[in-house]
Structure formats: C-alpha cells, structure tokens
C-alpha cells in the first residue's frame, strides 16, 4: 500500500516536471508561457520581501486564473469587511489572472503560486504561515494540500462543481480522491456535486451555490458610464459580442453585414490580437472604429465598435438589447452571468456549453438561445427585435434568476466565523 502511494506521488512529481519543462520550452515563442516562467523566477524574492516582516494573521486565497478570481472575489471582499485586521494573500497559477489583478487593492498582496513540489510547498507554507486557506473552484495541488492538512490549517474549497466523468470518480482516481479529503470543508454549487462526493465517502460537503451570482450582482450595482460608448451609441439599440473568437465571428459577421437589425454592434474579443481585429474590420462592411485608436474618426458615424482594451466587458452589457457570449464553438463558453444580470436576450454556440450549469439553466428559463449558424442567430434576434414585450419578459426572468441564486458568499462566511482562529 505504501509502495503504491509513493509510486503515485512519484508519477505526479514526474508529470509536474514534464509540464514545467514544456512551459519553459514554450516560453521562447509563447508570450503567456514566457510570463509564467518569469513569474516563477521572481516569486520567491517578492514573497520573502513581504512575509519576512509581516506579522498579521494570514488568509490565503488561491485562484487558477481571472475567472476563478472573480468567482472568489465576493468572499475576499466579505472577509476583508469582517476581518480588516487580517492579511489577505491571493495567488494565481495563470499569467492571465496575475497580470490583470496583480495590483488589486482589495487584498494585501497578489503573487504567483510557486510551482507545486515537496520542497517548494513547505518553503511557501513556512514563509506565509496561513491560518486559513481558501481554494476557488478547482486546482488540486498535492504537496500544498497535504502540507496544509499536516499543519492542521483549515482549508476550504469554494464554488466547486463536479461531474461524473471527472477523474475523482474513476476506478483509477484514488490519488485524486485523496486530494479532496485534504479539504476541511467543500462548498459545492449544486446537489448533484454533493451526491457525487458523498458517493466516494467525502462527507464534509455543503451546497452553497455559486459565488459568481453574488459577484455579478455587485458588479451591476457599480457600473460607471463610459463616455466613449455613449458617444458611439447616440441613444441607439445595440448588441454586445462578448469574449468572441474567430469561430464566433465567422457566424456573426454575415448577420452584421446583412443589416437586418437596426442596431449598433460592440465587439469584445476573447484576446486582443491586432491581426485578428484587423481581419474582422476588413470583413465587416459597416463603418468600424476602435475603442483605443490614434485615428480621430467620429464615433457617432460608426456602426461597429471594436474594443481593443482590457477590463471593459462586464459593464458593456448594461443597456444592451442582445448579447452573444463567445467560446462555445471552441474551447468553452465564456461567462454568461455577467450578461444575464443586465437582462439582454442571450445567445451562444451549440458545441461546448453543456458543462456550464448556468448556461443550461438560462436556456431552460427561456433567457438564452443556442445557435449553430448565422441564419439561426438572425431568426432568433429578428423575432425578438419585433417583439419588445418578449424582450422585456426575458429581462425580468434574468433578474429573477440572478436574485434567486445569490447567497453563496454568506453561506461560506457563516462557516468561516465558526473557525476558531477567526
């Protein structure tokens, strides 16, 4: 038994070694890999600079990337409000999250997570001395989790969701099941996830819901107007194409060019790539303008706004008649809740959305539609454009759906208050 356990740990360590070598190799020509490698090179110097002099109680939040950060943010903010004297550390694995949130003022320090390993995890835990650890949604690092458990540090997993085909529930998934047992409590999004965990004898599970509902509601109450958007729209109706990829635009550009809808278009790419935006601009027959540009084209004369700056998307949905959420024709659907909180008629692709619980719920509620082609999208949105009453009903349903699913943050904080150190 001990040999089997040691073999699994060795295989895990070897897989991590190969993964790191791959990233270091890719860093020569891949910008994200390069940022990750640079981050790992600097991480210890930054952590030691802060934690050799820091003496407050530390709560450590770990988030994989930007999406998980936004999911954990309501808990961070609630924790800060309730325990302002404690030190909040946030770590990221991905450069995508770190680069955007490294200066986030709502916590005390933001860092990359040093790569998992027997020595690096012990060094990190010795240095930081967390008295509470909160992992958001996923990322199950063996040495960090076992190190926290050995030190008896309360460790929570929040906004988690599980599916039967995941490795935890496979006959060969014992190593990964053991990682789940290192958490002192797991907060899941739905009853199905709880049932799956209890089926593998993990009992410290609570259905709390998804903290993203709390997050998008809070965001919707803090939206600031964007003068550039106001000038561009000139009071006209508009559609937002959020976090779109080439596969999405292949289906949407024909609809834009047909001009069957008397609206303006706001396009936000998943990643800002100048060549891709230039390609879309060339293919679109209507007048386009960039949100960040040296040119002085009058905004009011344009019909299409290409957003080539970060951090705008969630607020752009406010006031939109329609929202197309990108990603479902490829890697996976982007955040639908950011749009739903404002109530536009939502559409997304038909290929990769089923694993997103909220997307399926939005379809069931009649708030969102799945499309496979430009013709699908045209029929859906033209019908809705000609039926303002139906669009108003969608908005009402959307807002009710968000309101009925809030409360995960308070459920988590209720448990945090019972932890002795807090």
Image (tube, helix red, strand yellow):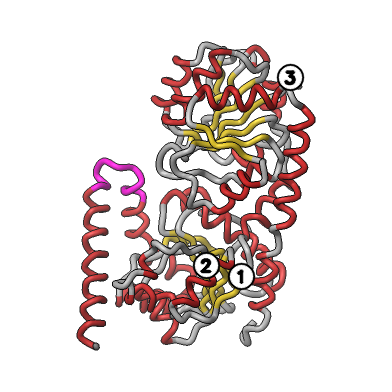
State the SS at label 2: helix
Q: Identify which residue, 296 or 258, lies in the foreground.
A: 258
- Residue 54, visible in the rendered structure: no
Identify residue for label 1.
207
State the SS at label 3: loop
Q: Position of residue 340 (x, y in %)?
A: 66, 43
Rounded to the nearest whole Å, what is the CA distance between mark 2 and mark 3? 47 Å
Q: Which residue: 66% across, 34% down?
A: 345
Identify residue for label 3.
234
Of labels 3 and 1, earlier in sequence is 1
Q: Nearer the viewer, mark 2 or mark 3?
A: 2
Identify residue for label 2.
193
Query: Contact (CB < 8 A) between labels 1 and 2?
Result: yes
Q: Quadrant of the C terminus?
A: bottom right
Q: Which range of residues does the magenta coloring cover?
A: 26-35
- Residue 142, visible in the rendered structure: yes
């Amino acid at each position: 038994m001990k040999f089997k356990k040691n073999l699994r740990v060795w295989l895990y360590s070897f897989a991590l070694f190969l993964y790191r070598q791959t990233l270091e190799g890719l860093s020569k020509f891949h910008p994200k890999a390069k940022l990750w490698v640079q981050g790992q090179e600097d991480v210890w110097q930054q952590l030691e600079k802060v934690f050799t002099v820091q003496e407050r109680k530390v709560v450590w939040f770990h988030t994989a990337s930007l999406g998980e950060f936004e999911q954990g943010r309501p808990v961070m903010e609630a924790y800060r409000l309730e325990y302002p004297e404690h030190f909040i550390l946030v770590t990221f694995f991905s450069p995508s999250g770190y680069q955007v949130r490294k200066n986030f003022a709502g916590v005390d320090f933001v860092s990359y997570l040093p790569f998992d390993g027997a020595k690096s995890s012990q060094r990190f835990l010795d240095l930081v001395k967390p008295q509470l650890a909160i992992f958001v949604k996923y990322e199950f690092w063996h040495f960090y989790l076992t190190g926290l458990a050995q030190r008896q540090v309360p460790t929570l997993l929040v906004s988690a969701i599980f599916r039967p085909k995941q490795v935890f529930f496979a006959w060969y998934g014992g190593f990964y099941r053991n990682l789940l047992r290192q958490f002192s409590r797991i907060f899941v999004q739905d009853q199905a996830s709880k049932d799956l965990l209890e089926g593998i004898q993990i009992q410290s599970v609570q259905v709390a819901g998804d903290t993203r509902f709390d997050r998008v509601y809070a965001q919707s109450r803090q939206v600031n107007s964007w003068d550039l958007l106001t000038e561009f729209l000139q009071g006209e109706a508009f559609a937002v194409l959020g976090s779109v990829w080439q596969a999405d635009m292949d289906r949407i550009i024909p609809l834009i060019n047909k001009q069957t809808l008397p609206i303006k278009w706001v396009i936000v790419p998943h990643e800002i790539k100048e060549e891709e935006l230039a390609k879309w601009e060339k293919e679109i027959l209507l007048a386009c303008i960039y949100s960040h540009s040296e040119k002085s084209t009058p905004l009011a004369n344009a019909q299409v706004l290409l957003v080539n700056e970060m951090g705008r998307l969630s607020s752009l949905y406010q006031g939109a008649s329609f929202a197309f959420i990108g990603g479902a024709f490829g890697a996976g659907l982007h955040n639908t809740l950011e749009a739903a909180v404002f109530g536009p008629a939502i559409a997304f692709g038909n290929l990769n959305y089923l694993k997103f619980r909220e997307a399926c719920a939005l379809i069931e509620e009649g708030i969102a539609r799945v499309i496979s082609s430009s013709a699908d999208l045209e029929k859906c949105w033209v019908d809705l454009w000609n039926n303002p009453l139906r669009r108003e009903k969608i908005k009402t349903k959307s807002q009710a759906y968000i309101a009925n699913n809030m409360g995960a943050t308070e459920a988590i904080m209720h448990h945090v208050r019972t932890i002795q150190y807090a």
